[in-house]
Amino acid sequence: MSRLSCLYLGLSLALSGTAVAAELDYSKMQQLGPVTATSAMPLSASPKADALRNNIARHLNDSALDSKVAMFGQDYRWQKVSKNNPDGAWLALQTQVTTQRFTQGKLTIAGLENPQLYIAGERVGSGDEIAITLRNGDYNLLILADGQSKDEALSIDWQGDADVDTLTLSKPANKRVSAELLFDSEVVNQLSLSPDGDYMLQTKTHYDASKGDSAIRVTELVKRDNQQLLYRWSDKRPSSVTWSANSKQLAFVYDGKIQTLTLADLSLTTLADDMKNVSGLTWVNDSLIFSWEKPFKADEKATNKRFQALQDRWSYWRNNAQIYQIDSNSGFIRQLTENAISSNLIDVSENGETILLSRHPVDYKEPAHGISHLIELNLADLKETEIGSYRTFASALYAEGGMYMLAGPNFMNGLGKQKSDLIVNDYDTQLYWRDANGKVTALSKDFDPSIGNAKKLPNGDLILQVGEQDRTNLYWYDKSKAKFNRLNTGLDVTNVFSVASGKSNTTLVYAGTSATEPQQAYSMNLKSQKKSLFDSRNRSYSDRKLGKIEDFDFTNKHGHNIDGRVYLPTDFDSNKKYPALVYYYGGTSPVGRNFTGRWPFNLWAAQGYVVYVLQPNGATGYGQEFSGRHVNAWGEFSADDIIEGTQKFLQAHDYVDPERVGNMGASYGGFMTMYLSTKTDIFAASMSHAGISNLSAYWGHGWWGYGYSGVASRGSFPWNNKQLYVEHSPMYHADKVTKPLLLLHGNADTNVPVGESHYMYTALKLLGKPVELIEFNGQDHHINGRQARFDWWDATLAWFDMHLKDEPQWWNYLYPETKAEQAKDQ
């Protein structure tokens, strides 16, 4: 779809969108130039005119209006607009404009030679009349021109397409966040600390409109204490990074080669090339262990495929990965495992004599319909010893005297359950200890957070990454005291972390965000002495303003505490009445307090919505009893919590208009949206992304449907629990839907096939119910492409603007045919 992707800005003078054009207030504009630096020809006459102007616009857009701009030995400053400028010199005019809704109109420019209009650094048009389409937001508006006309006075007029299409001009001020800023801004997404803690590998990623969906990544090797740069990869990034135990070498895969970097002289050595599909590099003394996958090559002439198992729906299942070892001195490689089933490297023993690996044969005998064989391989004679066959197994780590294991509460016949008769959720991962004699002990059954990741310290303690309510925290597990100690990271959500595994005074580095704070990265030790390594607020958000956030918890009718939070609009006024959006997942995990991501709560608040996010029963991180209510429920508890929570939210917040409340969710949350639409009319409009409408179809066709259902519907199947599979499927209750429903889905979704939205769309269309279905071409379960993400966000907000703000213009702009359909229905 074609439309301008723009940013944001300030406020002061409103310009009417009537049929009569309104001249812009020059007191709210600033001028740079005329720039008299000698040039061979005017900007527009150059064969590289577009590139030259784009170069100027990019630099001016990034420059502060109160700073000087140096060009070829001359200094220029932004100043008041002058209507009398010397001939033969280019100039720039700049202002900030604000819209409070989707806005369309045209800018008429007179008195400038070859004017070019840029908004938020992107060129949107040229000439005397330029059509403009803006989302609700704040924008930097820049006009470049070859000079001022001799024969015509300078004037810049705005004319909106309708009375509601107004612009507001202002001098520089803090701006609201935009879709582009939230998606494009630089973040740290990889950290790897050397065992001695002296060196750090970090990868930073950002996006640019000129690169489309391709991320711009830079990986740097730096000294941790002062960030001194030692080495940089900018065209491609190294993967499977691993440090030698003495911190003298870094090994990685780069451009199909296994390479090492020696820190003493920064020399690069290629150990082996033609190493495609290599992963999991791990040092073992003077060698490296790794996984090497052989992709399955199908017969190109075959007209059919016989499925060998349920897993055969996975495009990668017939690939085979085995474990290999390369000598770092000679470069020779040997194969360590051979099996018809892939062998997965898990860990290497401290002395380097054995490794842990796992295999996953087909086994549907018990929920969750999968099994893991945990195996120890002796590197001297390649003898394999099976440690055990487990269900709900996740991972393991060697430690002195045994090993740690991560698995669900039902692990080893319910060893991790708090109570023997408790229904538990096996996505609520627990920590176990297996001693040298094979005895397994549950360590975390009374620890409510769900454990996601573990890093071992030299003394056998652990640093754990856990889901704790709606936060992702780091904990230090003290083995000697069997105690979990939360680390004071200063963040709501820790996304990545690394530990100096060879240092007695434990050092770690980590990065993450908070609900209304963009990404930060820190270095710290277990005494919580922090040092800043990266600050996204200073880099990308220093001139941005955000609304406030408040907690809103309630006790439901069963006496359970339901956690929630409320995002307030930017420039919130409690005397106004606001529309609201209610967001939830309702599945097995809580909605985290990430600053941004696929669900940009801060963007919705910047668009004038109050946003209520709640965590209904069934989510992990709140204890086993709470998460266990996800099992064999499919909306039973969570729907009640969402309805009751919304009612109490409205009672407690009189600045929210109860007639203008929308709801949305994705995946299981999309199922919840459809399910709720058959249960209540409290919501004026709803949006379901990649939702499930027919439980039996998802169970039988989704790539992980049978496996997920093995946890969420443990022991229940369409033939033994029709009540669950039919009565909890929204499709079978489509006749109860009364409010408009938007269905969004990637048409390449393998997790929840797009048919799940089509089933509901077909039912509602035949019933004459208000429904829209939009597919995103080539997108899977998550909408990850840059432009596709913006289009997805736009469709969502335009839908709610139409139904909650009575502003259909944006929706009709995105989907022009709907305007005629709306007129026909009236």
Image (spheres, rainbow, N blue to C red):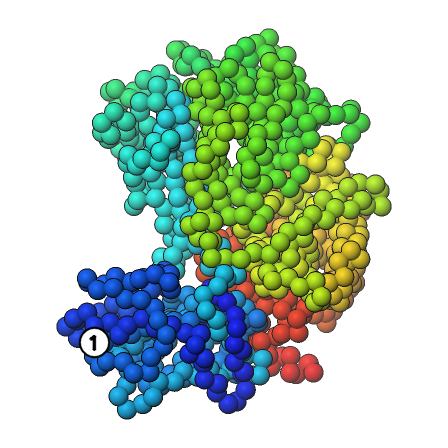
What residue did someone put label 1 on? 42
- Quadrant in the rendering for residue 364: top right
| Residue 173, horizontal then vertical, whole percent | 48, 63
Q: Secondary structure at mark 1?
A: loop
Mark 1, other Cα within 10 Å: few <14 / some 14–19 / many ≥20:
some
- Quadrant in the rendering for residue 109: bottom left
- At horizontal 36% and vertical 77% (from top left) the residue drawn is 81
Q: Is residue 195 visible?
A: yes
- At horizontal 54% and vertical 64% (from top left) the residue drawn is 794
| Residue 97, horizontal then vertical, whole percent | 48, 71
State the residue in front, 9 or 303: 9
State the residue in front, 101 or 376: 101
State the residue in front, 83 or 740: 83
- At horizontal 41% and vertical 74% (from top left) the residue drawn is 29
Give left or right: position of 730 versus 193: right
Q: Quadrant of the C terminus?
A: bottom right
Give left or right: position of 224 versus 406: left
Please state the total of marks drawn on the protein image.
Answer: 1
- At horizontal 39% and vertical 11% (from top left) the residue drawn is 380
| Residue 513, horizontal then vertical, whole percent | 53, 44
Give left or right: position of 782 versus 758: left
- Amino acid type of the residue tagged 1 in the rendering: Pro
In this rendering, the answer to whether 819 lies above or below 731 is below
In this rendering, the answer to whether 202 lies above or below 345 is below
Q: Residue furthest left?
A: 40
| Residue 571, horizontal then vertical, whole percent | 60, 62
State the residue in front, 288 or 159: 159
Q: Is residue 765 visible?
A: no
